Image (spheres, helix red, strand yellow):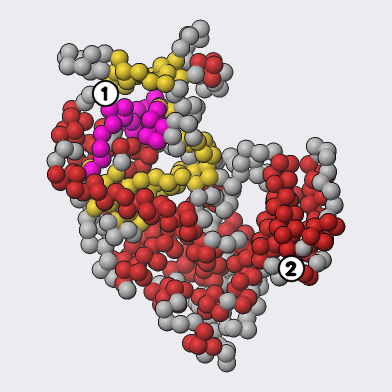
Amino acid sequence: MISKQEKLTLSPFMQIYDIVVPKNNMLRQINELVDFSFILEELKTKYCLDNGRNAIPPIRMFKYLLLKVIFDISDVDVVERSKYDMSFKYFLDMAPEDEVINPSSLTKFRRLRLKDTNLIDMLISKSVSIAVEKDIIKDKSVIVDATHTASRYIYKSPKEFIQEKSKRVRKTVQLFDQTISANLPDEPSTEKIQDHISYCQEIIKIIESEPKVQGIPAVVEKLNNLKETVEDYSEGVYYSVDEDARIGHKSASTSFYGYKTHIAMSDERIITAAVISSGEKSDGHYLEELISKTKSHGLSIEKVIADAAYSGKKNLRLTKDLGMSLISRLNPSITQAGQRKDGFDYNKDAGMYVCPAGHLAIRKARIGRKNVGKNQLQTYYFDIQKCMNCPIKSGCYKEGAKSKTYSISIKSQEHSDQAAFQETTEFKTISRSRYKIEAKNSELKNRHGYNKASYGGLFGMQIQGATTIFAVNLKRIIKLMQ
């Protein structure tokens, strides 16, 4: 059961916060900046209003998720820190003497209460409305880009993954107490996963019984990760499989397994829209959706600044029809990227096309002569062995063919116009602002753990993306207000 309204916290110790949480504390500033009652309004239909035990306030549960991404810590560690960190308790609207939640409550909150909610659009809309209210967003241009996030599940067998976690625990314990390390059992030599699970459970049991290392944060952190891995396996969650993650390419020789977050950002570095997809998706496909979402949040757009992945015909026509300038430098290889209906997409990082099955072209060649009245073709060659065994080769690969190619026209009227535009002083001046979104991507990854997914599946990635973007937007608003 949940109350229809927020309860007032009454405690004789509340004045402690005025002493230990200064006015310039970031969490105090966020609390003063944002009215979090919108979370209660959004989620109250997920609770019973007149029956059952009293539930933990949804605003508090949501704030726990914010603290996780602001400080890049696990469920267990964010709850543990909220026991003694007064700024955490103040942010969570708790009295100093209040008991904290059980970490497992956060998992249930994500799975049960946030399901079927458009969290990412709701949180971005809220942060953008605050920025508009504070008269922060003034420029009518947006910068768009995509950043990748590696899946928490990797190409390792469950045995290999558990071995890696257990070795980290042993090495960390050995740094602080070699006596305990010597008493740990030997790693099993068998290939049976259950033997390694039992081995890890024994390590956990021994270390938890040793008070000498229980207060050491490095040991506790590694031990918590091992416990979560063992529990996930027991519940049927395997770290080598993620049904929603896909292989994307960062360059012709490097790839990643995970997701992409397609971002639109104002010149003031406030993220105005975001779409999360699997890793193989083409960046240019999402420009129209990013523009639409930014405008739905109450912002006007006159200029769109992007890299070469967005310079396809479809995007050039879209921005022209909307009365916008597309500041996106052309690449002759991307003429029709983003508008092809045959499933082939251009990957601007690798400089190659990707087929509908996700295979990257192995080489390319230009066919035709310049300035002879006909368009030149850029032809991409795929690994024929992969094509022969592809599960979706019907209609794409012709049986018996000795090669598989894909060709695109290099020249078009839209790109000719854009080629002339990109030589102007206006284009060159405005395009210099694109570095700002690279810095924002770096902030998301290096300060807030966005380089790796915290949860499994697209749903978990959307929760992580929504809370992380909301947190960085609020931090940016506070900085600009100062």
Query: Depth check: 45 or 99 in front?
Result: 99
The answer to whether residue 376 is visible is yes
Quarter of the C terminus within the rendering = bottom left
Horizontal relation, residue 209 to residue 455: left or right: right
Place of residue 439 in the rendered image (x, y in percent of width and height, measured from the top left): 37, 53
Place of residue 457 in the rendered image (x, y in percent of width and height, measured from the top left): 56, 46
Question: Is-magenta flag for residue 336?
Answer: yes
Q: Which residue is mark 2?
A: 214
Q: Residue at x 23, y 42 (%)?
A: 326
The label shown at residue 410 is: 1
Marks 2/1 in contact by CB < 8 Å: the verdict is no
The stretch in magenta equals 327-352
* Image-quadrant location for residue 409: top left
Query: Depth check: 59 or 215 in front?
Result: 215
Quarter of the N terminus within the rendering = bottom right
* Image-quadrant location for residue 56: bottom right
Q: Earlier in the sequence, mark 2 or mark 1?
A: 2
The answer to whether residue 45 is visible is no
Place of residue 124 in the rendered image (x, y in percent of width and height, measured from the top left): 39, 59
Residue kind at label 2, given as amino acid type: Gln
Q: Residue at x 50, y 88 (%)?
A: 19
